[in-house]
Image: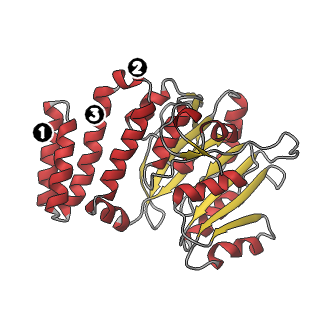
């Protein structure tokens, strides 16, 4: 695997690995590659794979690959090869390599023109692939299309939505600026051309969280990104134990600062100038959410540290009052 740094990937300062171009002599490539990263997904994996198989475009049009990142029970993923008579491939890591490296193995193995990364506990709604395919046909210059995501709980109940960014399908204007301010996309809702990955590289291996935010921003600086108003994906929100621990231990705030620094290093100056205040407010909001986790768990030192960082990014008295009020309610509640 050839590693790439700043100048090799449209100015990206994040440490990424190139996605090799496929040889021109490779014929009969499928249109789609669906990559399903999985680790100890249990029964959720069945729902994920079935949501793809129910929309199967056929072996000549779609390849389906489960990326097993050393699950405790190897048969959890491997059984799918037998169940589908080889229709679903499994690539297994014998040691836990982490999200970005697992994604990378799938990108390198992919042969499709369109790449969809679908976590092993998420799923897509009916007609996702058909409507996405139509968007790329209508807008051949688009590097990626994404859709609305539903947030679902562990029982599959919808508890929220990302929202419709526009009422019709089409290219989003100034999307890179929006993505710079805050994350607009949940991974199961986006489809990107393989040529985009080949151009900008894979996911930043230093990030064990927020790697998708940086990836979509880096790609949007070089390629048009569109929104598909007729497709939906489901993103599962866990009980929060792992996320809570990462906040209290300081790992998640550190990764948040890291991803901000990575994007700032290669973001064009004109975007940084135009979006300076909006981004500061968005950072304050995100840090506030971290501080509320600490407040609810009466973790004083993490709360003080994160809350002070949040205050530094506040840009209005109204936001300051809301940040302080929310924090006090977090302690009381």
Q: Nearer the viewer, mark 2 or mark 3?
A: 2
The numbered disc on residue 14 is none
For the question of whether residue 185 can be seen, the reply is no
- Compute the Cα span from label 1 to label 3: 16 Å
Q: Where is residue 138 in the image (x, y as percent from the top left)?
A: 70, 29
Image: 98 above or below 231: below
- Assess disc 2: are there few (<14), some (14-19) or many (≥20) residues with their C-alpha within 10 Å of its C-alpha: few
- Compute the Cα span from label 2 to label 1: 30 Å
Q: Residue at x 67, y 34 (%)?
A: 135
**Residue ID for mark 3:** 280
**Residue ID for mark 2:** 270
Q: Position of residue 2 (x, y in %)?
A: 64, 47
> Residue 314 sits in which quadrant?
top left
Q: In which quarter of the image is the C terminus?
A: bottom left
- The front one of 38 and 306 is 306
The numbered disc on residue 321 is 1
Left or right: residue 98 versus residue 83 is: left
Image: 76 above or below 166: below
């Amino acid at each position: 695997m050839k590693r790439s740094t700043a100048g090799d990937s449209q100015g990206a300062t994040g440490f990424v690995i190139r996605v090799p171009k496929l040889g021109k002599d490779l014929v009969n490539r499928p249109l789609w590659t669906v990559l399903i990263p999985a680790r100890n997904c249990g029964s959720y994996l069945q729902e994920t794979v079935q949501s793809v198989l129910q929309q199967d475009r056929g072996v000549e049009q779609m390849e389906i690959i489960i990326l097993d990142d050393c699950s405790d029970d190897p048969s959890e993923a491997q059984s799918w090869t037998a169940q589908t008579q080889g229709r679903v491939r499994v690539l297994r890591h014998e040691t836990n390599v982490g999200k970005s490296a697992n994604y990378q193995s799938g990108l390198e193995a992919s042969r499709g023109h369109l790449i969809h990364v679908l976590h092993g506990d998420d799923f897509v709604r009916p007609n996702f692939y058909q409507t996405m395919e139509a968007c790329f046909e209508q807008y051949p210059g688009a590097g990626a299309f994404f859709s609305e995501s539903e947030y679902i709980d562990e029982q599959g109940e919808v508890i929220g939505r990302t929202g419709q960014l526009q009422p019709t399908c089409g290219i989003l204007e100034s999307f890179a600026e929006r993505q710079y301010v805050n994350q607009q996309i949940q991974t199961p809702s986006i489809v990107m051309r393989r040529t985009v990955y080949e151009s900008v590289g894979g996911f930043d291996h230093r990030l064990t969280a927020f790697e998708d935010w940086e990836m979509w921003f880096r790609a949007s600086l070089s390629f048009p990104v569109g929104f598909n108003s007729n497709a939906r994906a489901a993103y599962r929100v866990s009980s929060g134990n792992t996320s809570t621990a990462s906040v209290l231990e300081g790992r998640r705030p550190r990764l948040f600062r890291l991803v901000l620094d990575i994007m700032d290093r290669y973001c064009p100056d004109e975007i940084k100038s135009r979006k300076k205040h909006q981004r500061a407010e968005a950072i304050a909001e995100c840090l506030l959410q971290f501080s509320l986790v600490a407040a609810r768990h009466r973790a004083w030192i993490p709360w003080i540290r994160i809350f002070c960082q949040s205050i530094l990014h506040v840009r209005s008295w109204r936001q300051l009052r809301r940040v302080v009020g929310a924090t006090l309610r977090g302690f009381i509640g």
